[in-house]
Image (tube, rainbow, N blue to C red):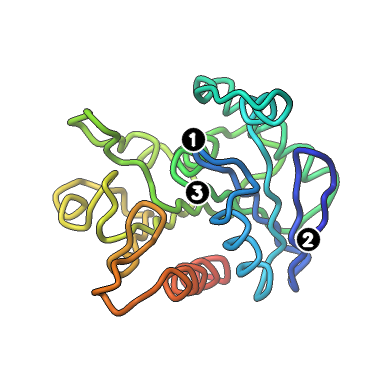
Amino acid sequence: MMDLNTNWLLDQGKDSDTLVLFAHGAGADMHSDFMADYAALLAASGPSVLRFNFPYMVKRGEDGKRRPPDRAPALLQSFEQTLAAAVAAFAPKRLFLMGKSMGGRMAAMLAANDKLAMTPSGVICLGYPFLPPKKTEPRLEPLWECASPLLILQGERDSFGKREQLASWALPEQAKVRFITDGDHSFVPRKSSGKDLKANLQDAVKESLLFIGS
């Protein structure tokens, strides 16, 4: 892992021609265990993975104060700027956008932008936040508007969109959905399932690698 600056972390992969830009979720930054473990597992078998912090997380790192996420336009602007800087710094031949929860939603939204410095080859959403608490309508618009191939990796028990709920929602044809056994929003299974988090992360990474290689 390489700390390029205080807001970027690079996990160097075997395939240096492919770069995955990895956005965090609403509550945990790029240093979280989930982000670090997923990036390391993915890079160990394939592409380089670049993690970054959105502006509100940068501020939290500076003063230690918890604050809500920036509004979507500010998040997308930051994501686009990071994409442009990463393309300039690493000159990848292929670029994928990946995000945990909110970061995945932003990745899908950003991929609808036809003026990016490099067109993404695909988008990977880890625990897509279909149905936030107290909401009754799923967030499907970003998925329908996403201009890139799309992989959604969803825990079967994800409170933001369970397996049985997804079966009743209309998803675009370009969206592949793969379910993580008994996983919650961070792919954590119950002990009674016979699975553990390590195995679920490995399963999710395997699906990610298949998608990136396709």
Q: Which residue is mark 1?
A: 26
- Closer to the camera in the image, 14 or 9: 9
Task: Name the residue rendered at 85%, 47% in the picture.
Answer: 4
Tag 2 secondary structure: loop
- Residue under pointer 3: 148
Image position of 88 (left or right of 143): right
Q: Nearer the viewer, mark 3 or mark 2?
A: 2
Quadrant for the N terminus, please. bottom right
Q: Horizontal and vertical percent for residue 105?
A: 45, 39
Query: What's the CA distance linking mark 1 and mark 2?
Result: 23 Å
Rendered location of residue 37, percent (x, y): 59, 62
- 6 vs 174: above or below: above
Amino acid type of the residue that numbered disc 1 sits on in the rendered structure = Ala
> Residue 1 — which label?
2
In space, the residues marked 3 and 2 are separated at their CA atoms by 28 Å
Q: Amino acid at mark 2?
A: Met
Q: In the picture provided, is 164 more to the left or to the right than 43? A: left
- Closer to the chain start, of discs 1 and 2, is 2
Contact (CB < 8 A) between labels 1 and 3? no
User: Does residue 197 sit above or below 168 in this rendering?
Assistant: below
The residue closer to the viewer here, 46 or 30, is 30
Label 2 Cα crowd, 10 Å radius (few <14 / some 14-19 / many 20+): some
Tell me the quarter of the picture where residue 136 sits: top left
Whether residues under marks 1 and 2 lie with C-beta atoms below 8 angstroms apart, the answer is no
- N-terminal label among 3 and 2: 2
What's the amino acid at mark 3?
Answer: Ser
In this rendering, the answer to whether 205 lies above or below 95 is below
Instruction: Name the outermost residue toward the bottom.
Output: 194
Measured as percent of width and height from the top left, residue 77 is found at: 63, 25
| Nearer the observer, 32 or 77 | 32
- Helix, strand or loop for disc 3: loop
Q: Is residue 30 left or right of residue 142?
A: right
